[in-house]
Amino acid sequence: MKRHISLGFVYAAVIVALAMASGLNAQQGGQVNLGSVTIPRAVRADGKPLPAGTYQVRLTAEEARPAAAGQTPNLERWVEFLQKGQVRGREVVTIVPGSDIKAIAEETPPASGGNKVQMLKGNDYLRLWLNRGGQHYLIHLPV
């Protein structure tokens, strides 16, 4: 009996780890609240204006299409920017597992649960970098 219970816990732990590693730790309908970010200046999200302000960022279950060349399936999805429960904009997010972040980012990532808002070289793009449970979410918004 104890062996069956132990195996059940192992299987459950593996399923949870796989879901988190693939960015699928979704709640309702595949949506996950990634937290709040303050965008300091007007940007464009999905080609539409997104004013400066504080937004809740919500990961959706919708994958970006067409998939980027060389990208692991399900690691490019859409996020929504919400204010007062209303979607104000959406953009594609690249999900980077914690084990891979050092290969693509030269700087120190934000702490788990934190975020960074950065102007990239040339001031053409604003990058939102969110870290949730060791998963990194990178959103690039044209200024």
Image: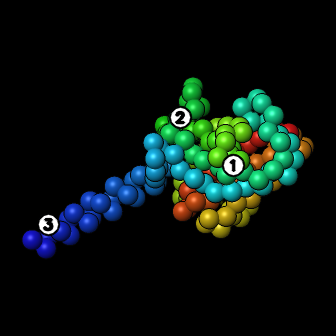
Q: Give the distance between the C-alpha atoms of the residues marked 1 and 3, in whole angstroms.
A: 47 Å
Spot occupied by residue 40 in the image (x, y as percentages of width and height): 85, 52
Q: In the image, is 113 to the left or to the right of 24?
A: right
Using the image, tell me which numbered label, if any, was put on residue 63: 2
Identify the image quadrant of the C terminus: top right
Spot occupied by residue 114 in the image (x, y as percentages of width and height): 67, 64
Q: Mark 1 or mark 3, which is nearer to you?
A: 1
Residue lying at the far left of the rendered structure: 1
Q: Nearer the viewer, residue 54 or 95?
A: 54
Q: Residue at x 53, y 50 (%)?
A: 32
Residue lying at the far bottom of the rendered structure: 2
Q: Residue at x 64, y 57 (%)?
A: 35
Closer to the N terminus: mark 1 or mark 3? 3
* Residue where numbered disc 3 is placed: 4
Residue lying at the far right of the rendered structure: 122
Judge the density around disc 2: few (<14), some (14-19), many (≥20) Cα neighbours within 10 Å.
Answer: some
- Whether residue 64 is visible to the viewer of this picture, yes or no, is yes
Q: Give the distance between the C-alpha atoms of the residues marked 2 and 3, in whole angstroms.
A: 37 Å
Judge the density around disc 3: few (<14), some (14-19), many (≥20) Cα neighbours within 10 Å.
Answer: few
User: Quadrant location of residue 71?
Assistant: top right
Q: Nearer the viewer, residue 6 or 68?
A: 6
* Residue where numbered disc 1 is placed: 84
Q: Residue at x 81, y 34 (%)?
A: 49
